[in-house]
């Protein structure tokens, strides 16, 4: 008896995305083929097209899912009265959200160049929304005299680069806990925005 259409979609679809994410993070988008993804998942290459239209769509979906999850989680950031408290919360949130998602972070930052112009525009818009959270905090802190930054946009990008780069070297089994790292990074961020 033939199986019902979509009976394994809840299992295979996530497996396709997880496998593609891992392979792209390890080898790069250009070096990974749909055939490799299918082999790792354990399906025929034609079966992948039940879960994605093509490799470009798969890359976009991986980046889009990461950004949507990030923005959804950021909505839960506490709304403290002071920009300094909000900046600390943002710093700690960014680290905690990104550290366990090293492959997604790598793909989201390093493979932007491989998106089609239309897909790039959509991901860029989502990234701008997230960057806007930090930029608004910096602008308010600057307006209130709490922060001293020459350019809020440049400072936003510099701080996100600093915080996101943590996943390149941090190891959970290293000598410092995530909380200790957060505290150190918060010190760096605080010094970067105050005179």
Image (spheres, grey):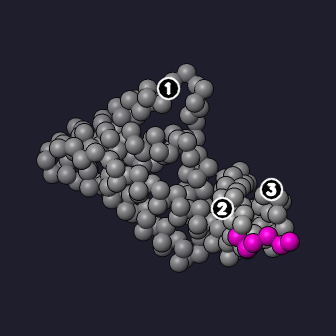
Residue annotated with mark 1: 177
Left/right placement of residue 123 relative to residue 183 reads right
Left/right placement of residue 7 relative to residue 93 reads right
Q: CA distance from mark 3 to mark 2?
A: 17 Å
Residue at 39% x, 63% y: name it: 128
Mark 3 lies on a secondary structure that is: helix
The nearer-to-camera label among 3 and 2 is 2
Span shown in magenta: 1-6
Residue at 55% x, 51% y: name it: 105
Q: Residue furthest front?
A: 1
Q: Is residue 171 magenta?
A: no
Residue annotated with mark 2: 10
Residue annotated with mark 3: 40
Q: Nearer the viewer, residue 146 or 154?
A: 146
* Mark closest to the chain's N terminus, 1 or 3: 3
Local crowd size for mark 2, using a 10 Å CA cut-off: few (<14), some (14–19), many (≥20): few
List x then y, in percent, for residue 174.
58, 25
Q: CA distance from mark 1 to mark 3?
A: 34 Å
Local crowd size for mark 3, using a 10 Å CA cut-off: few (<14), some (14–19), many (≥20): some
Q: Residue furthest top?
A: 175
């Amino acid at each position: 008896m033939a199986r019902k259409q979509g009976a394994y979609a809840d299992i295979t679809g996530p497996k396709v995305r997880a496998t593609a994410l891992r392979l792209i993070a390890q080898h790069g988008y250009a070096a990974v083929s749909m055939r490799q993804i299918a082999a790792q998942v354990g399906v025929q290459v034609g079966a992948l097209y039940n879960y994605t239209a093509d490799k470009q769509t798969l890359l976009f979906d991986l980046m889009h899912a990461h950004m949507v999850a990030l923005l959804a989680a950021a909505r839960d950031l506490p709304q403290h009265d002071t920009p300094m408290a909000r900046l600390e919360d943002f710093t700690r949130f960014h680290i905690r959200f990104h550290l366990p998602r090293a492959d997604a972070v790598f793909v989201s930052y390093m493979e932007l160049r491989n998106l089609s112009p239309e897909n790039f525009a959509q991901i860029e818009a989502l990234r701008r929304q997230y960057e806007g959270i930090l930029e608004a905090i910096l602008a308010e802190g600057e307006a209130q005299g709490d922060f001293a930054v020459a350019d809020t946009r440049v400072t936003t990008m510099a701080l996100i680069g600093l915080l996101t780069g943590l996943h390149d070297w941090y190891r959970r089994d290293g000598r410092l806990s995530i909380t200790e790292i957060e505290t150190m990074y918060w010190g760096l961020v605080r010094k970067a925005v105050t005179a």
